[in-house]
């Protein structure tokens, strides 16, 4: 394994990734006295909850190059290089290995940057089977693209991603180069950089999403966009529906989702997970397609940019908030941190200081249910009732009303 020369160790300035939040938790006073040592890691892997949909899940990575965007950091003759992963409903998965939450090299770099490299052997597995054939049912699969947060990685919302795939969606996650931890097929491991030339603004993320949609159209037309022309799973070519496309993102990725929707009418529905909606120049223009916001710390009441974006939503719109949620609550953190707390010997208070007071079990169920209900409604026209109002099954979820 090699590591790219543009590595920086300064990028993690907030709790927008697992490693950063691990560091925050470890820095808290230990229960029972400051001198108490943290427990040694257990030998068992961390685990992600299995998806609840009716289908097993397949997955495959794509190595993509956007030749319309030169890469100034990589040098003359280089273009924007991205890793993407497609998740989809599969069949006959038993012969296919299960994909890790993150590739080994990327996971090691991710945790090492936060001083927790010893946790890498505990890295969880996903429910996705690498290369499994696509389940074909006579109709093409609706597509959802995902954008991660700042200094995070494309696997940080695997709970939601594999849930959607198990319910019949093709989900494409993208690793936004220079602001993520990712691993390329030749063994290079890239991490976030501290370089003002790096294309890491929300608008750059949005351009990545739009390029990925171009690749979705290639797959739908029967063409392989992988730059290395690696073999794709049986049935993937021609299985995606480019006319039914949604997008979601967390934090900066949620802002990028809004930005991409304003620029690209191919995205029919968008979901922002605690997105700050902060851009320069600001997000402007009315959006008439459906958009849902799941808020935690970046609320309309406290953030003018979020309120301004909300005021420009002219179509179907909904703002949810889970009581007790913090910024990292809408992601795999809620499934993984309770397990990390046991490994590290954290107190209940230490764990809450990292993931908030929202019950982790309910937090996972929220991530599985509400995005699926949103995309079912707007991409599949399935009329459920979860988005109509508060539900006794999810007592923490509140509907934030009002026009402002």
Image (cartoon, grey):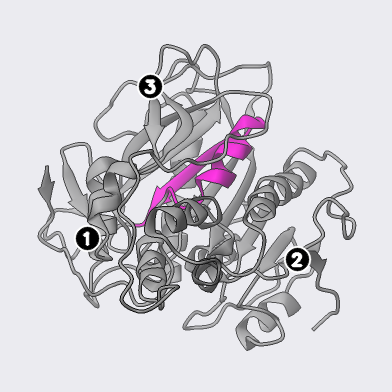
Give SS at disc 2: strand
Secondary structure beneath dot 1 equals loop
Asked whether 164 falls inside the magenta stretch, the response is yes
Report the quarter where the N terminus lies. Answer: top left
Residue under label 3, please give it.
97
Relative to residue 184, is residue 249 depicted above or below?
A: below
44 in relation to 211, above or below = above
Residue 224 in percent (x, y) is at 38, 28
Q: Residues within 10 Å of mark 3 (few under 14, many from 20)?
A: some
Badge 1 is on which residue? 71
How many marks overall?
Answer: 3
Q: Are marks 1 and 3 in contact (CB under 8 Å)?
A: no
Instruction: Give the quadrant of the C terminus.
Output: bottom right
Between disc 1 and disc 2, whose residue precedes? Answer: 1
Between circles 3 and 2, the one closer to the viewer is 3
Residue at the location (47% across, 13% down)?
Answer: 94
């Amino acid at each position: 394994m090699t590591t790219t020369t543009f590595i920086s160790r300064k990028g993690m300035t907030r709790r927008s990734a697992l490693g950063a939040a691990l560091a925050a938790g470890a820095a808290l006073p230990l229960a029972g006295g400051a001198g108490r040592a943290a427990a040694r890691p257990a030998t068992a892997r961390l685990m992600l909850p299995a998806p609840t949909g009716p289908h097993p899940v397949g997955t495959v990575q794509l190595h993509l190059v956007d030749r319309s965007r030169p890469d100034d950091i990589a040098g003359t003759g280089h273009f924007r290089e991205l890793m993407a992963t497609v998740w989809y409903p599969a069949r006959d998965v038993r012969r296919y290995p299960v994909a890790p939450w993150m590739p080994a090299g990327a996971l090691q770099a991710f945790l090492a940057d936060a001083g927790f490299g010893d946790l890498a052997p505990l890295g969880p597995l996903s429910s996705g089977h690498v290369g499994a054939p696509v389940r074909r049912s006579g109709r093409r699969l609706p597509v959802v693209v995902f954008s991660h947060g700042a200094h995070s990685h494309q696997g940080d919302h695997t709970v939601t991603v594999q849930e959607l795939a198990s319910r019949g969606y093709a989900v494409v996650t993208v690793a936004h180069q220079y602001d993520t931890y990712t691993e390329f097929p030749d063994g290079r491991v890239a991490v976030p950089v501290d370089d003002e030339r790096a294309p890491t603004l929300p608008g750059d993320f949005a351009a990545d999403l739009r390029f990925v949609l171009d690749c979705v159209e290639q797959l739908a037309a029967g063409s392989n966009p992988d730059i290395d022309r690696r073999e794709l799973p049986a049935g993937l070519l021609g299985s995606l529906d480019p006319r039914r496309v949604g997008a979601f993102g967390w934090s900066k990725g949620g802002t990028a989702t809004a930005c991409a929707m304003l620029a690209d009418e191919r995205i029919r529905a968008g979901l922002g997970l605690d997105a700050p909606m902060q851009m320069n120049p600001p997000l402007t223009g009315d959006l008439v397609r459906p958009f849902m916001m799941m808020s935690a710390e970046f609320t309309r009441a406290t953030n003018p940019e979020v309120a301004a974006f909300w005021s420009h939503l002219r179509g179907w719109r909904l703002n949810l908030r889970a009581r007790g949620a913090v910024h990292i609550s809408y992601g795999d953190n809620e499934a993984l941190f309770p397990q990390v707390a046991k490994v590290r010997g954290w107190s209940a208070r230490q764990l809450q200081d990292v993931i908030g007071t929202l019950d982790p079990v309910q937090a996972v169920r929220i991530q599985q249910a509400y995005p699926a209900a949103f995309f079912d409604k707007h991409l599949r026209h399935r009329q459920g009732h979860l988005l109509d109002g508060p539900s006794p099954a999810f007592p923490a979820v509140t509907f934030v009303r009002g026009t402002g």
